[in-house]
Image (spheres, rainbow, N blue to C red):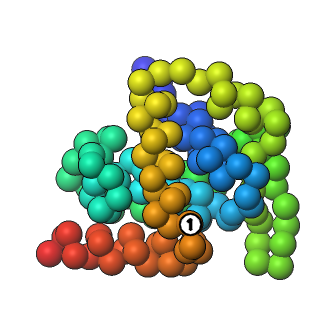
């Protein structure tokens, strides 16, 4: 049986929403993937009132796999023509394009609405931080929570 949960397609939709909220601002895959992770577990990371994916016992150990899945999702989105990639001196950066915006604008579900609100909160919370600072924050909370 094939499942959509945690598939590249599912994660790609969330990543595309993150890019949509960034509104053309270019970010690297670690930043974008970290925002997805923080959006899913916003209560755990003191950003929101609830964790969209619940309080799973292993949620604090997911960062590494989420970063890798985020990279794969961004490759998928580029191949599908839904986002743009640009090579810089600091690596690859991604932004949403018009095709990607149209996809997000046509998404309509309670889950998507909740995710968008949590993603806006996460991006607002970290608007002045880079990917290294965001990951450092995540790791700090993860270490504290595991004790």
Q: Is residue 96 left or right of residue 110?
A: right
Q: Quadrant of residue 89?
A: bottom right
Q: Tell me where residue 47 appears, x and y as whole percent.
A: 35, 58
Q: What residue appears at the point 55 percent right and 74 percent down from the top-left corner?
A: 129
Judged from the image, the secondary structure of the residue bearing numbered disc 1 is loop
Along the line of sight, which residue is nearer the eye, 2 or 75?
75
Furthest-left residue in this view: 147
Q: Tell me where residue 135 appears, x and y as whole percent.
A: 47, 72
Along the line of sight, which residue is nearer the eye, 125 or 96?
125
Q: What residue appears at the point 69 percent right and 63 percent down from the top-left corner?
A: 27
Q: What residue appears at the point 27 percent right and 46 percent down from the top-left corner?
A: 50
Which corner quadrant holds the N terminus? Answer: top left
Q: Which residue is mark 1?
A: 127
Q: What residue appears at the point 50 percent right and 67 percent down from the top-left corner?
A: 126
Q: Tell me where residue 125 appears, x and y as whole percent.
A: 46, 63
Is residue 74 something one can see in this rendering? no
Which corner quadrant holds the C terminus? Answer: bottom left
Q: Is residue 25 left or right of residue 87?
A: left
Q: How many marks?
A: 1
Q: Tell me where residue 61 appears, x and y as whole percent.
A: 33, 62
Residue 41 to residue 61: above or below: above
Residue 35 to residue 111: above or below: below
Mark 1 Cα-neighbour bin, 10 Å: few <14, some 14–19, many ≥20 = few
Residue 120 to residue 60: above or below: above
Q: Is residue 107 left or right of residue 114?
A: right
Is residue 83 something one can see in this rendering? yes
């Amino acid at each position: 049986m094939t499942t959509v949960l945690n598939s590249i397609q599912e994660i790609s939709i969330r990543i595309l929403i993150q890019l949509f909220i960034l509104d053309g601002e270019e970010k690297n895959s670690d930043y974008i993937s970290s925002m997805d992770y923080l959006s899913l577990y916003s209560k755990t990371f003191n950003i929101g009132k609830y964790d969209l994916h619940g309080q799973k016992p292993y949620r604090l150990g997911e960062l590494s796999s989420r970063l890798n899945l985020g990279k794969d999702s961004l490759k998928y989105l580029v191949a599908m023509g839904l986002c743009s990639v640009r090579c810089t001196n600091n690596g690859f950066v991604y932004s949403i394009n018009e095709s990607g915006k149209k996809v997000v604008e046509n998404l309509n579900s309670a889950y998507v609405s909740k995710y968008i609100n949590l993603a806006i909160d996460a991006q607002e919370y970290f608007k002045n931080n880079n990917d290294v600072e965001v990951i450092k924050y995540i790791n700090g909370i993860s270490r504290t929570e595991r004790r």
